[in-house]
Image (cartoon, coloured by chain):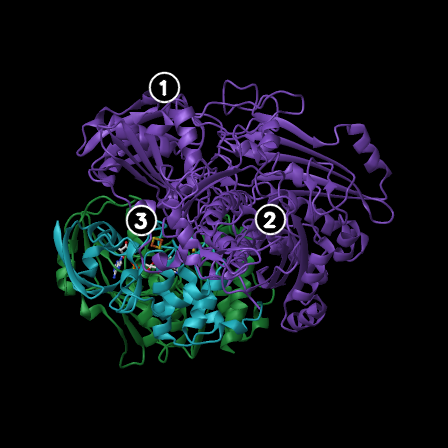
Amino acid sequence: MPKDSGIGASSKRREDVRFLTGAGNYTDDINVHGQAYVFFLRSDIAHGRLKSVDTSAAEGMPGVVKVFTGKDFEGVGGMPCGWEVTDKHGAPMQEPPHPILAQGKVRHVGDPIAAVVADSLEQARDAAEAIDVDIEELTAVIDMKAAAQDGSTLVHDDLKNNICYDWQLGETDDAKVDEVFANAAHVTTLDLVNNRLVANPMEPRVAVGEYKRGTDEYTLYTTSQNPHVIRLLMCAFVLGLPEHKVRVVAPDVGGGFGTKIFHYAEEAFCTFAAKACNRPVKWTSSRTEAFMSDAHGRDHVSKIELALDAENNFVGLRTNTYANLGAYLSTFSSSVPTWLHGTLMAGNYKTPVIQVNVKAMFTNTVPVDAYRGAGRPEATFQLERVVDKAARELGVDPIALRRQNFVTQFPYDTPVALTYDTGDYNGTMDKLEAAADLAGFAARRAQSEANGKLRGLGINCYIEACGIAPSNIVGMLGARAGLYDAATVRVNATGSISVMVGAHSHGQGHETAFPQVVADMIGIDESMVEIVHGDTSKIPFGMGTYGSRSLAVCGSAMVKATEKVIEKAKRIAAHLLEASEADIELKDGQFSVAGTDKSVAWGDVTLTAYVPHNYPLEVEPGLEETAFYDPANFTFPAGAYACEVEVDPETGQVSVEKFTAADDFGNIINPMIVDGQVHGGIGQGIGQALLENCAYDENGQLLSASYMDYAMPRADDVPFYGVDHSSQTPCTHNPLGVKGCGEAGAIGSPPAVVNAVLDALNSGGKAVDHIDMPVSPSRVWAAMNG
Amino acid sequence: MYSFEFEKPSTIADAVAALAAEDAQALGGGQTLIPTLKQRLASPSALVSLSGISEMQGVCVEDDGSVSVGGATTHATVASEAANTYPALAALAGQIGDPAVRNRGTIGGSVANNDPAACYPAGVLGSGATIRTNTREIAADDFFEGMFSTALDDGEIITSVRFPVPQAASYQKFLQPASRFALVGVFLARFADGVRVAVTGASEDGVFRWSEAEQALNTSFSPDALMGLHVNPMNMIADLHGSKDYRAHLVSVMTKRAVAACS
Amino acid sequence: MTQVSMTVNGKSVSGDVEGRTLLSSFLRDHLSLTGTHVGCDTAQCGACVVHVNGEAVKSCNMLALEADGTDVGTIEGQSNADGSLNVIQQAFQDHHGLQCGFCTPGMVMSAAALLKENPRPTEAEIRKYLEGNLCRCTGYHNIVKAIMAASGQDAGSIAAE
Ligand SMILES: Cc1cc2nc3c(=O)[nH]c(=O)nc-3n(C[C@H](O)[C@H](O)[C@H](O)COP(=O)(O)OP(=O)(O)OC[C@H]3O[C@@H](n4cnc5c(N)ncnc54)[C@H](O)[C@@H]3O)c2cc1C
Ligand code: FES
Ligand code: FES
């Protein structure tokens, strides 16, 4: 029987009512009295030296309040990077400055050169057109491998080359790795590209800065996944403001997918300009601007080699990756190709020797940072593509080859720095085989063939490290922040509860799922609990939502705070019931004395806490507790996915006919929401596999700068998805036993789709080894026709 | 957008007069023009809306049996009102963009714009239609002059398009995956006196007639008649979504499918 | 500035606008009806879909003055008279057809237009009809399911459940 409330219930989302009636409050819906608008003049040249920026004509244009250039920010800090990666020789990464407005050089199409603040946006834009910019165009650095060559043009003149770091993880002894490969019975090698993507939350970024001279206080409304992180970075590293004078509000946010984690120049600009102009300043990104200013995702070029022994056991794995960081280091960019990618190269397999090599490159492109999955999709894609290719080369069943190499004993220490606490990869694969009706595939293939189509089946396994992250570990690895989270449980006198959380909900349904936990723990109705998030003036210092961490980390803090509340409430109840605290039990919102029929209701105890007339003197009045939770380990959601495609052999058109996901997320609080997260991830993964491609030409011009050329998945590009979450091995180290589900779909689906396409082509007699994503009709056709 | 005046006349004559002003421009459904203005790629002094002119609205059958579509008729209206009289044209209109775009976008705007990936130009050229303006009639064969270029003069308004109705016709559209315009679209119409094949999406020169295919189909109207026939890839568009060779290949595939649909 | 008048969600409204003022801006900035969202500048995302004289229209791609004298419906006017969710809105909540909610107003308005035209659409018809509405969160699964449910079809029977 499915539960109808509390943990495990598919409670309907309460936030939906405002979203469905047009009553949401997104950042662009916020207008502050007297606000001015900023328009950023952005470079249309990928790489060039700024010889002069003449704003004099613009300054006199109608409605113009003030015009800013890089010079106005010379005394101000630049955009910081939150993670210092150490390269394989022990040196810190090269870390070039990232000014709010370009100084000296422009480094990508979209790099902001000047900002015009005016009474209206159109006036700001008119004035921006009157700015005279003289740029000496330089050779654009676009191709990563060329950028790594000695003598390449430098993106940053002060760096020794374009390589941010040359990093390694796993086996450090090259000779040992060589030996494993030399002795292998079979080696499968694959060169592949993980295509550059644009996250494209449907809500473009917006920032509104406000300054009150009377109290010397700033407010920034922004489309962020983590308002406290923005406040900290902006105050401490960019503008040098005292945090207590700055409030950052991230109201309803229309999707993030990673790209709204980062602290962006426009946020710092609006905050700064609000004081400089003595007026609130608003910026609303157009979609075109979003394409050239939101951090992009992925963009790896890799070679992966898998060594197998004569029994088809994986004995060695080596990867060499070029990872594009773009022109500047975005907030968490440096961690993505390293600690979020290299550490996942073991996948679900017990490969004993693994070596991961990553060169991270500066190029004249938009900065690249975390996008849904962040590093883990890149790892999974390489691994699962090479495993699939190995199975084809060896003529063995791809599922059997995977099963044979699965990790089966837990905890398991991988050769790439992680300890998997728990999992059941065979059990999850069993669920997949049943849910996807793999037994019926042959018949479905015959049916497709009768209709003139090729049908393929693609399998994929993934593991991810979520619940980011133990602060002490990430600190050792170079993180410049802690990655705990926090929650305050404030019980009101009448027993209703407000929970202030550091996590931020921008689609994940925290406002519904988090109360399910608290209500369940106390035994009250979910509607008695509300979640407050997104406003630094209201919530404790938490790190926000990304990396599938909200419930595992912030939810754990909430559980701990609720436990503290319950403990205190029991002391009050014991007093009221004239019993010993140890004998008090809480069930269904009633405190009772064990073994008696004496009880007192939750509401009576909470009222007593605030009206402490009959009260234990040694206990403080009030009922409000805060907890911080720092995870002991990552969590390790894992799964097995199956995709069936049809390929039209005449046109190369691929259609996804069936998609099934079997995931192990540990315990599940709200199955409806979890299914939805997986659906969304799969949708994006199918997008990456078949449609999406952020492309630059050799001059650094962005070819896919709008939805006219950047293909977003639409409703008719995807099928209904089958989702099975019945494989559940609870996380061993957090109180809820939850692992995180937000990114799984996006990690697990691209290889399944590509494997399916290749299976289809090979079944049709086309010996095609690999097609790079997006597997567009033209690429499939080209591959089929040699 | 730069600022402009807005006018909404109710007769063609008033519209022509309004368009005589310097830098005035006609506004059909705005589905192409408004995004262009947002990018500040055009700066008309005035937009003259054609949506209030009732004589430019709707689909009707003329005495000779041809179907006439008013220049300001939306794609949605053509999709429903021409469904019985010229089903292939209605089907084409029903494949343009999405429902909301079809509720605003007009045939006049589409034909005047002559986007190399647009659908209507293939239907108009493939049908051998006649474009009627406030001053003259122009045969489709003389109208389309290459990408975004037509025989229209400044201020000239497409008041209607007259389509002779073929015995059979079909529009086969292969979607560009991002914009959903035609990566390649083929409109094939079979008349008593011959076959016309018009191709959109593919060529650097915009919509064109594939005369080799027409000849082959005049000899034998079957997909097999096209065996071995290919357009020259040299003139095809190459972009993110498809190479020249791929587009050339798709022209053959889509033409065969159109023949099959008409057989 | 020119005066524009129209009926929005059953109420007559008017305001002074420029030639270039878009219907979406008129709704959001002049009438503070911020439920209509703007997600792109090429008329592709559909976050801005409203009804003009009963037809779905992308309000980011229509001049406010073009809507003079029309009857405009927005997401704010969709609920039942007592403020409760209408059938489509309720189906979206019941079937988790939204996550971040940004695409949702456009989705609901498009769904309403579809069901008016085609009261029992098939899955394929729904997917086709939503060609101009992008959602980045849901992978469309639950949106399609919600629309099927809103049309009185058994969404529970969807194969891949
Ligand atoms: C999301 C989206 C998807 C689309 N998909 C497709 C597609 O798949 N296939 C396709 O073919 N098109 C597509 N379009 C374009 C759409 O069909 C437009 O409606 C059409 O191209 C232009 O028609 P309009 O009435 O909107 O013209 P407008 O945008 O108003 O005007 C376009 C040009 O034509 C001029 N003009 C307008 N009417 C007349 C007239 N009667 N006489 C002379 N000149 C005139 C204008 O001055 C302007 O220069 C799409 C558009 C969008 C926004
Ligand atoms: S905002 Fe109107 S379609 Fe995107
Ligand atoms: S719910 Fe977020 S875009 Fe659709």
Q: Position of residue B61 (x, y in %)?
A: 29, 79
Mark 3 residue type: Thr
Q: CA distance from mark 2 to mark 1?
A: 45 Å
Q: CA distance from mark 3 to mark 2?
A: 47 Å
Q: Secondary structure at mark 2?
A: loop
Q: Nearer the viewer, mark 3 or mark 1?
A: 1
Decide if residue A421 is on the left or right side of residue A214: right
Quadrant the N terminus of chain A occupies? bottom right
Q: Position of residue A587 (x, y in %)?
A: 52, 57
Q: Is residue A224 above or below residue A164?
A: below
Viewer-nearest residue: C152 or B87? C152
Q: Nearer the viewer, mark 2 or mark 1?
A: 2
Q: Which residue is mark 3?
A: B36
Q: Is residue A392 visible?
A: no
Q: Position of residue A301 (x, y in %)?
A: 62, 38
Disc 3 C-beta below 8 A from ligand 1: yes
Residue at image point 32% right, 34% down = A40
- Chain of the residue that carries numbered disc 3 in the rendered image: B
Q: Secondary structure at mark 3?
A: helix
- Color used for chain B? green
Decide if residue C8 is on the left or right side of residue C36: left
Disc 1 C-beta below 8 A from ligand 2: no
Within 10 Å of disc 1 (Cα), the crowding (few <14, some 14-19, many 20+) is few
Chain in purple on the image: A
- Color used for chain C? cyan
- Splitting the image into four quadrants, where does ligand 1 fall? bottom left
Mark 1 residue type: Glu
Q: Which residue is mark 1?
A: A74
Decide if residue A444 is on the left or right side of residue A10: right
Mark 2 residue type: Lys
Q: Which residue is mark 2?
A: A739
